[in-house]
Amino acid sequence: MKLKNINNLFFVYPIFLFIVLSLASCGSGGGSGSDVSINAPAGTGSVAILLTDSPTDDFSEVNITISKIELLSDDSKVTVFSGNKILNLLDLKNETTLFSIENNVPAISYNKIRLTVIKVELIDKNGQLATKSVHLPGNGKIDLNPRQPFSVTPGEMLALQLDLDAEKSLKLDENKNKYNFRPVVFIDIIENVPPEKLLRIKGIVHDIDLINKTFRLCPDNNDLDSYNGASDDVNNNGCCITVYVSDDTSFFSSEDGGQPIPFKDLAEGSSAAAIGFYKTDSSINAESESCRLGLDAIVVQTGNFFKLTGTIKSDVDPVTDQFDFQVDPDQAVESVNPITVELQEGTKIYSTMGAALDESAIQENRRAEIDGKMVLASDPSLPDLLKATFISVDLDSILLDKLSGEIDNINHNAGTFDIITSVETLCVEIADDAQIFLITEDGTLVSQMITFEDLDNGIQVDIYGSNNSASGCFAADTVIAFESK
């Protein structure tokens, strides 16, 4: 997957949407299964939808309401999610979270993914509704066309990884008074390979097995936030996730001031969040109430913990294991800002792409997101402490520029063209690994990846990249072509 953790002149980071098809029968995620009668001798599977996001410097919230997700074949369609879920995508920074699960997905070949989005709402950094509204072309129906069909196979795992880039998907109209939502989506069809990013699962602890080092996290139907992060429509029939524990897994309890606890002190029926890497779990049979989706946990938190986004303001003090952290606005921090963060025994530090790091990654001016418990100092001369349990550090944010205009003088052999903008004409070079998208609208909005050979003169494009000092041309990493039918 390309263009991770990048930022352009509008200071909006990508949003990533992952859909993982877990081919085992488990609880319903609010969908209705097949909408068309299908003879599917190969059997059925189940669909687990996972979501992840990266931060934005333009908005404090990007709220998107999804009402339906469908898989389409040549002669049928299958609903894998139905309902109204309002997601603040910025709550899912740097990680993945379970969205919903649907069973009885026919094991056939599909060639299209359809999203129905009924609203996108932007909240500015002052907590106010953005003055520019978001228009949904195509009546909110968005068809995503992978380059080749994909098949659901009984008893196996297939992952459809949808990487939805918010900044490139929000295009100002000609009058600059509103955004048009035209999704730019990276699609990867992955077999037996989990996403790179960490997965966060919330739920209620059940079936603790100290010998085999496992427990289950199950939905709490009385808590909207316990299962899927944000929802108006709780997944009442959601299945349980098996969490696998190793000697390196860290456990923390908010009731103990955010301090580390041993695995044996994990309590049945407690509310918990587990962070780790998901895995397929073929040991679970189709009749089980557990999902065929497991989690190799690196951190388990019981109780209530903060998750704060901000900027690191100092290196770690080798004596106190503390550093300063400037918390972003609108995060309900009552302490002095910047706050003091303390590393504990077992605090895990990872990159936003899921790589394990040590405390040397804590460097001034790096962006980070920190889980922890705020402990107020009893002595006024001492600082309040955020006792950290998990830290996600953005190691590399790349600044990209954007150009909009019309293609001219295209040279398919050389991989170049000119772009005629409103103020000038510039030469453009296309990187060998550039992502090229075509957005079309004909009743339904269609977003698909194409090749450079599919581009031609006269097409309107947005391009993202930076100037190449050697050639003097603009080096494009992403090209988005627009066409109305």
Image (cartoon, helix red, strand yellow):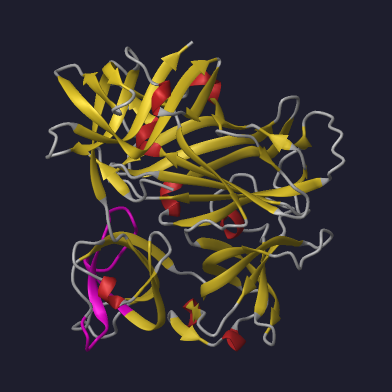
Dividing the picture into quadrants, the one containing residue 416 is top left
Indicate whether residue 374 is drawn in magenta.
no
Q: Nearer the viewer, residue 141 or 19?
A: 19
Relative placement, left or right, of 434 versus 473 is right
Residue at x 38%, y 60% (from the top left corner): 352
Q: Main secondary structure of the magenta part?
A: loop
Say which residue appears at 60% left-offset and 82% top-offset. 266
Residue 198 in the figure: left or right of residue 6: right
Position of residue 423 in the picture relative to residue 105 (left or right): left
Image x and y of residue 110, in percent: 68, 34
How many numbered markers are drawn?
0
User: Could you say where residue 404 lies in the image, as x and y percent from the top left?
Assistant: 26, 23
Q: Nearer the viewer, residue 68 or 308?
A: 68
Q: Quadrant of the rendered structure where residue 35 is?
A: top right
What x and y, as percent, mark residue 386? 33, 74
Q: Is residue 285 left or right of residue 21?
A: right
The span shown in magenta is 317-342
- Residue 178 visible? The answer is yes
Residue 415 sits above or below residue 88 on the image: above
Front residue of 97 and 128? 97
Does 309 appear above or below 214? above
Among all residues in the image, which is located at the extreme front? Answer: 413
From this view, report whether residue 95 is shown above or below residue 456.
Answer: below
Residue 372 is at least partly visible in this image: no
Q: Residue 395 in the image: x percent, y percent?
A: 29, 61
